[in-house]
Image: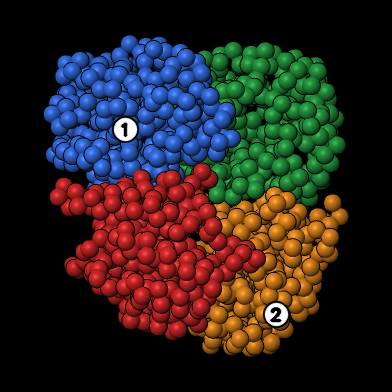
Chain colours: A blue, B red, C orange, D green
Amino acid sequence: MCAMIDNLKLVSLKGKEKTLIKVGDVEIGKDFVLIAGPCTIETEDQMLQTALEVKRSGANILRGGAFKPRTSPYEFQGLGLEGLKILNKVGRKIGLPVVSEILDTKDVALAVEYLDILQIGARNMQNYSLLKEVGRIGKPVLLKRGMFSTFSEWLNCAEYILNEGNPNVILCERGIRSFETYTRNTLDLSAVPVMKELTHLPIIVDPSHGTGKSALVTSMSLAAVAAGADGLMIEVHYRPETALSDKEQSLNPKEFAELSGKVKKLKDFMQRL
Amino acid sequence: MCAMIDNLKLVSLKGKEKTLIKVGDVEIGKDFVLIAGPCTIETEDQMLQTALEVKRSGANILRGGAFKPRTSPYEFQGLGLEGLKILNKVGRKIGLPVVSEILDTKDVALAVEYLDILQIGARNMQNYSLLKEVGRIGKPVLLKRGMFSTFSEWLNCAEYILNEGNPNVILCERGIRSFETYTRNTLDLSAVPVMKELTHLPIIVDPSHGTGKSALVTSMSLAAVAAGADGLMIEVHYRPETALSDKEQSLNPKEFAELSGKVKKLKDFMQRL
Amino acid sequence: MCAMIDNLKLVSLKGKEKTLIKVGDVEIGKDFVLIAGPCTIETEDQMLQTALEVKRSGANILRGGAFKPRTSPYEFQGLGLEGLKILNKVGRKIGLPVVSEILDTKDVALAVEYLDILQIGARNMQNYSLLKEVGRIGKPVLLKRGMFSTFSEWLNCAEYILNEGNPNVILCERGIRSFETYTRNTLDLSAVPVMKELTHLPIIVDPSHGTGKSALVTSMSLAAVAAGADGLMIEVHYRPETALSDKEQSLNPKEFAELSGKVKKLKDFMQRL
Amino acid sequence: MCAMIDNLKLVSLKGKEKTLIKVGDVEIGKDFVLIAGPCTIETEDQMLQTALEVKRSGANILRGGAFKPRTSPYEFQGLGLEGLKILNKVGRKIGLPVVSEILDTKDVALAVEYLDILQIGARNMQNYSLLKEVGRIGKPVLLKRGMFSTFSEWLNCAEYILNEGNPNVILCERGIRSFETYTRNTLDLSAVPVMKELTHLPIIVDPSHGTGKSALVTSMSLAAVAAGADGLMIEVHYRPETALSDKEQSLNPKEFAELSGKVKKLKDFMQRL
């Protein structure tokens, strides 16, 4: 292990302070960050209604997908640039920073104008061209773990970004692929203490993709907090039953409000423990 | 899923009360159960010293391995029946019930004399002869999830035991095998809320085998409690550096005392949350 | 790797001759062995009809399951000892040696009377009590690779058997569990050249369980032969559509005859290549 | 399964002729294609020496990596465009078409000038932007299976390319990630008969990445041919011990000559079988 991390001079914890990343009112790595919003940006109204709900319940960053990596070419691919504009507009209106996934090096320059954090998704974790591209921008990057990626490979991908000059990387565990099919993925919460051991970068958890089932999201969110996570990323839709994607794993506003309340109380408790 | 559990008429939650299993002073499924002790029973002194420590720190059941399933035939295979006798003697001396793993149908009849709970290990989860054998005894069974087993297969194995007439099964998540090698296994904490959803049987977590690293055990124990686990099983050795097996994942008494303290405070907090 | 195999003084290839195991007219390890028969022994008639067919098409060992490891306790568990008797009777009648799986140490002594080869199945590969028990008998053992077992673990299990005094172990690759669900398992044919590199024990392949689909069995059988396998184990039923288990992966007599013809021609060709 | 492939109207076999792709003198899908060359293009001399050797031994397409997806940012990333120019020059000099991997949508337009086939690597199999980009060009695409991708996901990725207007896709099985670490990947040869069953696209096999060990490459190549593969992709270096990458899995010219001779004889035999 030491060998593994020794090559990673930039992301390695050794002799470094914990990375703190200021986004809006939150200092990620110090303050607990709660990112919430729909899987896919569908309309301005859907986005705004959902955003108002998650803000009211304590989310401090808004998420929404504009460029969607979909298994089939015949599934809705997202609104693209138009989606980023909606997200940006809604975020400014309600006063929340925004994060969205980027799939293509060509889109990075434009996306930077509309986003506060750029997300690299699980399928693109080892898209090294994209990593280098977001390594050259001045905005933070949320780097999801690939569904087939070891801790070592994940940290190497973070090193790619830091090596280009961008120190502001947030790691996000979102479940790995295993033989178990009852859950969509197998959420590997050991990633949280492992990353605390190895790197100074903040680590958050996405239990929505990690489980694929809304009924499991709250339990796994609480578990992530108890494991020491710096934050959570939760899929919320103001009307999940109408969502264009991921409706099985999206919380409705009421469920999210309950989750948020419990998570914040637990986080406070953990800090005193 | 419904289809999956519909065949499991005995373990299925549907229309049943949660199973409570009285062992010593603890009612598993209602009271939080903390099982602790060494991987392997080495000597009466080692067992007693460790037992005194874990009892002082709040463990309510004592564990220790007598029949050891070892990868190589040249590794220490455990003290066998002699080990069970030591475990039984130490348990009675300090007043804690005891649990140990059984590997062979031939040993069940004798083991029942010395143990309060019989454990079926991960490698034997689908040893159906053994499942049927422990289904015919009057003592509770702790059934570990196989390292390659789905939730459905695991519940079917519990059904084998209940179907023979023994209703007292405790499920134990201990990590599954994935491509990740930094941790010994990938601890699948989603097993906790999933089992709550599907069955009335209590579910506990073994973060020692689940991570294989003592430095990760406390974080994952807290995560398990936050996810709703009914208990924990922790490897503790009074001098881990001298342990005959699993020394990398065993806690020393001081570490266990800290873990126990935190776990109990967290459990209390969770009940009020 | 060298480290891995260095501990395995008995199964390691180093300085040893290839193991040849005489069963009936076949010398396994030298002659190509074709094991065939139904998943489950259902009736004497079913067994006899199937046996006549596979013998006519060139099978040199007959298989049939008496003790069936079934996922659910409510599935047919096999005829048990009665099945072994049928298998033995049919085998003697048509002049083929017989192999069947044993699940329990208690059954080994009796099974030895009825079988020419005892099989340890994938779920029991690490049932060390059973390995030791079959290590003490005078009949060959067919050891299937566990569905989540590494080459190293598999060879260690063979070492358990040899270490008890039984040198006649036949390894059988039958597919490992992966994330792919289109095939029942992922048949890892690299096991063939790897085992040739590491051990003197013969290695055969079971493409029936390895794929779970009859339409894939012939292609994978030919691939196994080209990779250098010492034999094949094929599920055949005289009327697959009526089979009590594994009907999707069983060949009918005509399909098996075609497979057998092709396999033998390919084997001859490979020996000249 | 039918459901799985029913959505894939373009890649589905149903009612379609097998796709034949003319590249140089070879009609892929009809003629057996043998692609060979070094992992990485290092110098013009290394490329030329290797190319002469593989051509002499019967390779009909030349490979070489210019844009290298490397786990660490500190490993050699390839010569980039300069590498493509070398590959193109060497290919024209000796009269072989050339294939190389592209990582970034930005590079596709230029790469098309230098390459006869564009390769999408395992890590980028689900880089949908890149798939769409190569779907709009007039050159064939070699699409590797992702190391954690199901057959269904792989075929969906091919559908992305066909859906943009490029019908010339060659599938390449290169091993999936499993728990086994003795081999670099687990080469899933069942992909060959499965793809024959499901799609009209040609399917080739890469046993170099599939095993990661030169000693296993020939056996697995023969197995692939026996399974029905339309071709092979083999890493060859004129001096593997000096290779900048993948030296463990590269064949030297003599080994490749032997492999090629055996493969061609086996292919002829299989056509008569």
**Badge 1 amino acid:** Asp
Quarter of the image where one finds residue C210: bottom right
Res. D16 in view: no
Quarter of the image where one finds residue C17: bottom right
Mark identifier at residue B99: none
Q: The residue marked by circle 2 belongs to what chain? A: C
The residues bearing labels 2 and 1 have C-alpha atoms spaced at a distance of: 60 Å
Residue at 32% from the left image edge and 58% from the top image edge: B57
Within 10 Å of disc 1 (Cα), the crowding (few <14, some 14-19, many 20+) is many
**Badge 2 amino acid:** Lys
Q: Judge if badges 2 and 1 mark residues of a common chain.
A: no
List the residue tagged with mark 1. Answer: A230
Residue at 71% from the left image edge and 26% from the top image edge: D244
Q: Is residue A223 left or right of residue D259?
A: left
Mark identifier at residue C139: 2
Relative height, residue C179 to residue C44 (above, below): above
Q: Is residue D238 left or right of residue D188?
A: right
